[in-house]
Image (cartoon, grey):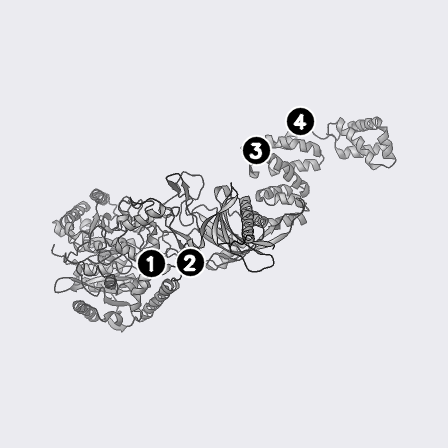
Amino acid sequence: MKFEAVIGLEVHVQLDTKSKMFTRVPCGFGKPPNSLTDPVVLGLPGALPVMNREAIDKSIKVGLLLGCKIAPVCKWDRKNYFYPDMPKNYQITQFDQPICEGGEVEIELPGDSPAVMGEHRMVKLTRIHLEEDVGKLTHYENDSLVDYNRAGSPLLEIVSEPDMYSPEETFSFLTSLRNSLIYAGISSCDMEKGQLRCDANISVRPVGTKTLGTKVELKNLNTISGVKNGVEYEIKRQIKAIEEKEEIVQETRRWNPDQRYTTPMRSKEMAHDYRYFPDPDLMPVKIDQAWVDGIAKQVPEKPFDKQRRYMTELNLPYSITSALCPDFSLCQYFELVASQTNDPKKVGNWVVNDLLRELSNANSEANSISIEESPVTPQHLAELVNLIEQGVISNNVAKELFPEMFSSGKTATTLIKEKGLEVKSDQVEIEKICTRAIENDPDAAQKFKDGKEGAINALKGFVMKETRGQANPKVVDAMLRDLLLK
Amino acid sequence: MSNANIVSKTAVELSHSLSEKELSSQEIAQAYLEQIDRVDPQVHAFLHRDDNDFLAQASASDKRRAEGNILGPLDGIPVAIKDVISVQGQPLTAASKILENYISPYDATVIRKLKAAGAVIGGRLNLDEFAMGSSTENSAYGPTRNPWDFNRVPGGSSGGSSAAVAAREAPLTLGSDTGGSIRQPASLCGVVGVKPTYGMVSRYGLAAFASSLDQIGPFSQTVEDAALLLETISGHDPLDSTSYPTEVPQYSAAIGNSLPPCTLGLPKEFFGEGIDDEVRKAIDQTIEFYRSLGHKIVEVSLPTTDLAVPVYYVIATAEASSNLARYDGIRYTSRSEQSENAINVYAKSRGEGFGEEVKRRCILGAYGLSSGYYDAYYLKAQKTRTLIREDFNRVFEEVDVILTPTAPTPAFKFGEKSNDPISMYLSDIFTISTNLAGLPALSVPCGFTQAGLPIGMQLIGQAFEESNLLSIAHAYDREHLFGCKSPNI
């Protein structure tokens, strides 16, 4: 019997807001333990929550970005359970009236080769709700320490339908979702900092059947590839179990990334009764059309829409767009350069090949440089591209100059002057060298005269070699033809 | 001026003496400290005092006055605080063992407002643990005694706040009212107590019992004093999402205006069986008084009255079960010495730290919220709460205020109801529905029994109509001033 997997994901995203979800204390990472706290965060007697409007704004933005229905009214509920990472022993969340419902995430599956676009598909979302994050526990042999710096940070939970069918699809889903959220300035989505966390609900069923199998919830999937690997393992484990006539039990399992297997955490019987009820300290939130319309103006073009536009309007090849479009900052850089030049495709090549290479070389040396910090600014690159087009320098010279522009931060014009690299367009001198080239290789000259167009390249090569690449190729071409066909 | 003279004064009188330079704030503070020294060993209204801090605040007030910078009529006047309201640097025990060692690092909004008005904040007042009870017998630190009869309870949960005013240990105190916890002890101790409209006074800094019902309010000898204290602590607070954005009228000025003829409603459901004869007689006399002033008295009906107590005990306990979860032995609350692991810390610390009534209510509340029971209890109670609110709305289409007894009986004896939770719950039968409806209500002393126990009447007003409510109460109070009569202690 053949089996297929059905997967749904629950993705937690920390919103990038100035202050916490229900108080004025700033959000932050890497600060001294328990320094980002106040009576509200610590759940002191008498402290009360007050909602952060920026978090609602950002949640609406996510909803619009992913095509969700924005609830006209959403409310806050308490989820009650005892755990030391939660100061109040209840979490403020949204139980039955979430801020967003429905929506979808566009995913791309791997193509036949990196140069070929893969199949696209929409993965359906169930809902998106807003809640407060919990603190962080660190366990030692005899003690556990708790840091409430993260506690109370706004956390968005994005729940998909059971609408993915392979580990690759979960990978694509998370990658696409992450790109979109970064595009919209919702979150930095840094998984190492816990800004993006993911649980997976996995079941398997015989191919062709419609009902869902018993689901297992998988936790501790801390990286995007961890999700892929964990899901892959769990699918195999379930299929093997069914084939060996074992029953799949509804339970929560934990992915162990180092040993690469899943282990049981708790069974359905051990599941909590969270005693949800509306939080009496908070009022329901009414979101009118004017609020939504205001946010709609800030929703950016989605990554895949941008990619399609680059391919159709700018005529960029897929391989360039697939390197550019996942990175919002890179696209901004590209568009700035492209707007100051005439050939987007050439700009795309410069950005994807030369700029990314230099950035990655620089980043390997323990200091990371973001695209915004590139020593070659968009203006610098635009100038370089324009200099080539104007024939001031050749493409080859430009390729050699670029690493130096990157390391020194100097403009192409400055470096050309310093090195005396201006292209030679002096007719008299070029005529002398061209004449020498023809004398040096009469064979090639004859072949060209006989109609072999390609033979001229050997002569051009001689001229370029003699001028160390500084001769203007257009001038050389015209001069050689002039001399040969005279 | 003798100490006995000073402490018998109302806040308005003290304020007058201060501005006439007959008294200094330090003299006032000293007089109250001596009165507390004298009577509190028996009354036991105070759980904690910080005399140095108290006198330092009084001295600061005198300095302001000398410099001509007084901050208002309450500048230099002592206000003692129920031990559930946060005052920076002072303990907050909620009369519970579990908060035995907790010092609040911040001021409640009402305290911030009082400090801005120059009031001299002093003393932590006894209560039923976490404000759960009607007699202060549930205090982990021993009960407060009724100053009119030490064998009787002062009411509760704000029994320390009512007894302190009655025993002249403070001219003004703050309490909190979730189902009658200001009005019932005010009635039993013969002082004025006001529960404002839900949302009128910020709850920020009040250790929550039931968030949708709790309100902070004043105790005093007179309605006039209560108006002064209420206008000082009221107003919108951006730190409390349930605080209502509205202007605060000058209640103390409003009650001085002449009162147009009003209609007072007597809900027939409140005048049935179970009311003490002397209480009924005193209420009849207040009704006659209002009639004699030219006000109209009509009988009205609140058919949902008998649903209020059960609805209250589902909603209040549900919220409490969640609100009190934070007292867990992990951070600032006392941790059981017996605990060995995380689950144990919770069970043992809470088991040892909470009293019987608190445990009873947490368990009751958790039950009502549990999966499978939510619809039958919590949801049903919320729907019924809406019906109760609609009942009041309908009645307020024809009356300005509703007049009832505050409590069915005068102060009862210690132990009389403490072994029977239901009978204790029923002592709040006249006060609970106003919390469920979010309405303002107050208790004004309206006489004494032959045995010398105080009796209180309750006036219930329309939401955010405190001015009107206080004016109608003041019309009675200024002619009787039962709250200014001191017990012989």
From this viewpoint, is residue B478 visible?
Answer: yes
Q: Nearer the viewer, mark 3 or mark 2?
A: 3
Q: Nearer the viewer, residue B140 or A32?
A: B140
- What chain letter is assigned to the residue under label 4? A
Given the image, what chain letter belongs to the residue carrying mark 3? A
The image position of residue B24, as x and y in percent, is: 18, 46
Using the numbered discs, state the Cα–Cα distance from disc 3 to disc 4 in whole angstroms.
29 Å
Secondary structure at badge 3 equals helix
Q: Which of marks 1 and 2 is in front?
A: 1
Q: Which of marks 3 and 1 is in front?
A: 1
Q: Which of B420 and B256 is in front in this view?
A: B420
Q: Are marks 2 and 4 on the same chain?
A: yes
Is disc 2 on the same chain as disc 1? no
Q: Which type of secondary structure does the marked residue at label 1 adopt?
A: helix
Q: Name the residue under label 3.
A: A364
Q: Residue B286, relative to residue A14: is it above or below?
A: below
